[in-house]
Amino acid sequence: IRHNPRGSDGPYEFVELRGGGTIPPNTWVLSVEGDHGSVGRINWSIDVSGRIFGATGLLLIKAAALSCPGVPSGTTLVDDMALNGMQGAIQNSAESMVLVRASAPLNITGSTNFTTLQSSVTVLDSVAWRDPPPTDGGVDQTFGPDVTGAPFAPVEAVLRLVGNSSPNAASAWAGGRMGGVTPNSVFFNREADGGSVTPNLPATAVLTPGEANDTAFGGTLACP
């Protein structure tokens, strides 16, 4: 998940799912607000029901305006107009990314609050990030495991660690601030001056949209 690219967010935000076969009905990805005052507001949502994972077992949700010629043909691409705007659609501050499934169709509108849905959905997986204290006012809320952890590590992108398939577990995720100077950067900022990564981020980790998370950077951006 890249939720806060360098510079302009859109159209460079993306969310990647891993799985196999056809995604069952009533399956959604939700980006849920955690900032005090707006807790539970669904800032972005996409219905992924019926989508089919390709040979790579990956599904990449990206802005419709973003071309990704370097993504393997075996990865399913899902274009979303909502990610096109300069400000993007996924919140940079306290936010939870939640994969849910319901027993009946969901009607998600601009006024839908996740707290009203919780009793009617199953959370298949989730990850969350938050603002640093005292910016969060001490009352930010997450609806998934907080990858920022302790000591606090601000993150602008997160990835699932290869070999750890535990759902809804902070230990399955790592991340950090983005490095580079362009919004399509896939590198984490590990510099002592202004950099920040979670302690469990592998030393060679980069974002690999459409490819396995342990794929080494080959010199060409998948989504230039």
Image (tube, rainbow, N blue to C red):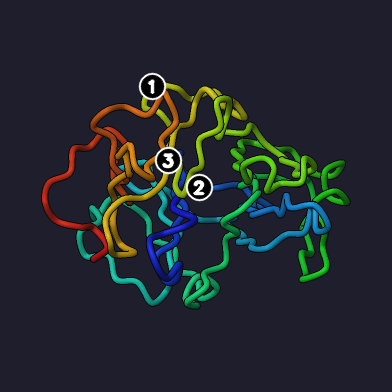
Mark 2 lies on a secondary structure that is: loop
Whole-Å distance between the Cαs marked 1 and 3?
Answer: 19 Å
Instruction: Tell me residue 193's x, y (percent).
Output: 34, 42
Residue bearing the label numbered 2: 22
Q: Which of the two discs, 2 and 3, sits closer to the camera?
A: 3
Quick one: label 3, few (<14), some, or many (20+) residues within 10 Å? many
Instruction: Tell me residue 93's x, y (percent).
Output: 61, 53
Residue 73 vs 144, above or below: the answer is: below
For image coordinates 34% across by 64% down, the residue present is 183
Residue bearing the label numbered 1: 163
Residue type at mark 2 is Thr
Residue type at mark 1 is Gly
Residue bearing the label numbered 3: 176
Residue 97 vs 14, above or below: the answer is: above
Q: Earlier in the sequence, mark 1 or mark 3?
A: 1
For image coordinates 31% across by 50% down, the residue present is 179
Whole-Å distance between the Cαs marked 2 and 1?
Answer: 22 Å
Whole-Å distance between the Cαs marked 2 and 3?
Answer: 31 Å
For image coordinates 12% across by 46% down, the residue present is 218
Quick one: label 1, few (<14), some, or many (20+) residues within 10 Å? few
Quick one: label 2, few (<14), some, or many (20+) residues within 10 Å? few
Q: Earlier in the sequence, mark 2 or mark 1?
A: 2
Query: Left of 138 or right of it: where is 193?
Result: left
Q: Earlier in the sequence, mark 2 or mark 3?
A: 2
Query: Left of 73 or right of it: where is 194?
Result: right
Mark 1 lies on a secondary structure that is: loop
The C terminus is located in which quarter? bottom left
Residue type at mark 3 is Gly
Instruction: Tell me residue 105's x, y (percent).
Output: 77, 57
